[in-house]
Image (cartoon, grey):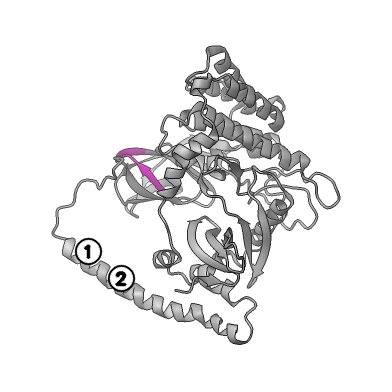
Amino acid sequence: MNRAAGPFEIIEILGEGSFGTVCVARVTGDPLRRKVALKILKGTYARNQKILNRTRDEARLLSRISHPNIVRVERLMDVGGRPVVVMEHVQGVSPDQLLMRFKEGLPGSVGIEIIRQTSLALHVAYNETAGDDGRPLRVIHRDIKPSNVILSIHGEVKVCDFGIAKGEFDGREAHTESVVMGSRPYMAPERLDGVSDSPAVDVYSAGMSLFELLTGRTMSLSINPVTHEQAMNRQLRYIRIEGMHDTAMEDLRDLLRRMCAYDRDYRPTALEAARQLEQCLYAIDSRYRVSLEEFARTTVIPIYESRPRITPEDAVQRNSEDDFLREVTGHLTVTGATGATAALAWTPYAFVGLLALVVAVLGALATYKVVNQQDATPAAYEVSDSGKVRVKVWLPSDGQAQVGGQFLPTPGHVLTYPGTTLMEIYFDNGSVLNCTFQAAEGIAVRYVVENGVGSLSVDDGLAQPCIQAAGPRKEEGGSMDGEKGG
């Protein structure tokens, strides 16, 4: 397989999101063989103008921001009408990946320092990053959560994924939408109420993220202002930091109360939050204080180095769609091809033919394996080493879910314990459904509507009705303030 892609050599597929694929690539013309990350829009969205505009806006925003706690964007390429974002490659893991190992929460000093540096990045993005006219860009991230932060193998904190960010800059392409985008558990209440976004929405999300990093739990707060604070006070009791005395612990809880306050006017600014988190950090006894550098050396590096390595060949075998194939091998290769190099344009098509043959052979082998295993007695569950099973979750386009304590902003897989499992579905209109199913290895659960009732189907079988936990919010005075810009 030819991994060379124009000026890049594809090394590894980092991951696949809802809209794009992120690859690690080596700059072929660089004598230092420097690595970068390429964010490539999926072919499915190549003609979706809204997604195209948002991707370009994200690149333009980040190319204007220079801060050690924000992933750097080097340039935006346009290949075959598809945007390709060339970014800084950060070797590290996200805090939500760390929480898979630290079930009860990260070491207190680590969680506090991650959110302290995240808050500094949010402050700089909104207040100190200037556009071409010298005015602040007023960047609001609008999707701060543990999975959108990276802790590098060197102990650096990097905020990433500004895909639904809002900013004030010339050349912005995305316009107002009537849909509120974001991740429900971390989303400030005013975003659901149609109130204009402000920097306070990021402070709220940072507070919710801090609670999760310190406890291993996702804080569940009511969209009702009367019960919001009661629910928060009840859950703040879970915070316990070794080496922090009671007075400092209560100061930390009070800071979280203000960061996650229902009324945004009560929340501190990102800079104020960062300063108070620094005070909380030094209130931890030095014997229990772990620096990010030390934590990265002892914990992040082993996790990062043991990650599953997905090569371009593996990715193609897992997803044989032509669009995906062209993303990792084709489109970039043909860019700027002239003379003898134009022959490279045929490489993807030749590979598609070869791929079809490989897929046919693999399909035959898989069929043979299934036929020969039919007489075997299956176990009740095929459980992973952790005792959990892998479940595929399909979600509606206007919903997000929480399954077994794991939050899913988009369809994907979760690891949960076998048996009766609760799945909470949060819809953009504010309604919440509670659905239950029997978790088992390899099953797929799908939200469906039958006879007007929201239900859950396992492996496309008989659907079981869900229970409505919260109704849709009332609209007052027009559409919600959603995607005003990127």
Q: Is 416 included in the stretch rendered in magenta?
A: yes
- Segment colored magenta: 413-421
Q: Nearer the viewer, residue 141 or 392?
A: 141
Q: CA distance from mark 1 to mark 2?
A: 12 Å
| Residue found at the very far right of the displayed protein | 133
Is 140 rendered above or below residue 87?
above
Mark 2 crowdedness (10 Å alpha carbons): few <14, some 14-19, many ≥20: few
Is 147 rendered above or below residue 284?
below
Q: Which residue does the image show at 72% across and 27% down from the upper left? A: 265
- Residue ID for mark 1: 370
Give SS at disc 2.
helix
Q: Nearer the viewer, residue 289 or 468?
A: 289
Image location (x, y in percent) of residue 425: 47, 42
Is 244 rendered above or below residue 374?
above
Q: Is residue 405 visible?
A: yes
**Three-letter code for the amino acid on which mark 1 is drawn:** Val
Q: Which residue does the image show at 84% across and 45% down from the upper left? A: 135
Quadrant assignment, res 309:
bottom left
Image location (x, y in percent) of residue 245: 53, 14
**Three-letter code for the amino acid on which mark 2 is drawn:** Leu
Q: Nearer the viewer, residue 69 or 179?
A: 69
| Residue found at the very far front of the displayed protein | 31
Residue 362 in the figure: left or right of residue 191: left
Give the numbered dot on residue 362. 2
Whichever of callouts 1 and 2 sits on the residue coming sooner in the sequence is 2
Residue 458 in the figure: left or right of residue 187: left
Image location (x, y in percent) of residue 288: 49, 23
Image location (x, y in percent) of residue 448: 43, 51
Residue 178 in the figure: left or right of residue 427: right
Is 283 rendered above or below residue 118?
above
